[in-house]
Image (cartoon, helix red, strand yellow):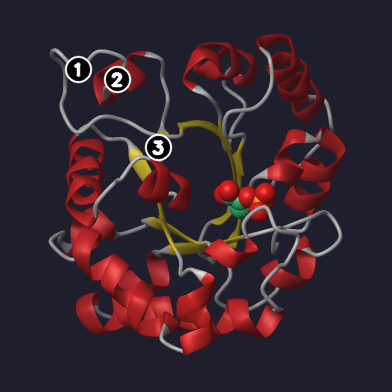
Amino acid sequence: MRKQIAAANWKMNLTVQQAGALTDELMNAGLQLGTDQEVILGVPFPYLSLVRGKLGDTPQFYVAAQNCHTQKSGAYTGEVSVDMLQSLEVSHVILGHSERREYFNESPKMLADKVDICLASGLKPVFCCGEPLAIRESGTENAYVEAQLRESLFHLGVEQLTGFIIAYEPIWAIGTGKTATNEQAQQMHAHIRQVMRNQYGEALANSISILYGGSVKAGNAAEIFAQPDVDGGLVGGASLVAVDFTAIIRGLKK
Ligand code: PEP
């Protein structure tokens, strides 16, 4: 089975004390992950080391940064490189979140460069894509998302993309409480998998995990995750509450 993944995106939230307490609660929740299940905690830079330390060598639990720079080092005041992340034993990086595309002007080319430097350094991207409301209303969401994949991923080879993680996050569903319907999520996930199949073949398409993001809650996670092409979720608001995020993790396909 493809990896079924519950990924948290804490964004710019929590104090260090709250981040520590939330991690402790998750680690003490008695979660029993199946062999194909993973949990990834996408935490703010200052808390990466703390959270990584608390996870210790717990299998199938990983820490993600929410961004990285395109260069390995240098005069880029305020930025964080993949080498720094690796030195903290961070394994994943969330890339291309719609908030970074919109508020920090992250272009498809910049994202392609970030994907490249992550892969070259052995860090796993969680690559986000998804359409704004106007695109959904115009009925052109399939082409829009396909272009996002083509522009930032299609320069890569099959080997680099095997087991890759894509998060489909319709912008109109992020933080709005307006979740995509099960059918809308399944339709787009099947489309993304078909796009990857057309470009890279069946084996690659079946190896990638496609996560749904956008107002996933404890009460709706299991039914969305049950869709055949949905391999888990990228969760913002509900990942900040231990009891909610543990319920979401328990909703992953077994
Ligand atoms: C996100 O920002 O990645 C996200 C999915 O947020 P929320 O779950 O709060 O909609």
Q: Quadrant of the C terminus?
A: bottom right
Q: CA distance from mark 1 to mark 3?
A: 19 Å
Q: Position of residue 196 (x, y in %)?
A: 31, 75
Q: Is residue 228 visible?
A: no
Secondary structure, mark 3, is strand
Viewer-proximal residue, 165 or 204? Answer: 165
Secondary structure, mark 1, is loop
234 displayed left or right of 237:
left
Which residue is drawn at the image coordinates 69% and 64% (left, top)? Answer: 253
Viewer-proximal residue, 251 or 212? Answer: 212
| Disc number for residue 79 | 2
Q: Label 3, on which residue?
A: 93
Nearest-to-viewer mark from 3 and 2 = 2
3 displayed left or right of 155:
right
Circle 1: is it few (<14), some (14-19), or many (20+) Cα within 10 Å?
A: few
Q: Is residue 245 visible?
A: yes
Which residue is drawn at the image coordinates 63% and 60% (left, top)? Answer: 214
Q: Label 1, on which residue?
A: 76
Secondary structure, mark 2, is loop
- The reply to whether the C-beta atoms of the residues labelled 2 and 1 are less than 8 Å apart is yes
Ligand 1 near label 1 (Cβ, under 8 Å)? Answer: no
Q: Amino acid at mark 2?
A: Glu
246 displayed left or right of 76:
right
- The reply to whether the C-beta atoms of the residues labelled 1 and 3 are less than 8 Å apart is no
Which residue is drawn at the image coordinates 80% and 65% (left, top)? Answer: 220
Q: Amino acid at mark 1?
A: Tyr
Nearest-to-viewer mark from 1 and 3 = 1
Q: Position of residue 98 (x, y in %)?
A: 45, 53
Q: CA distance from mark 2 to mark 1?
A: 6 Å
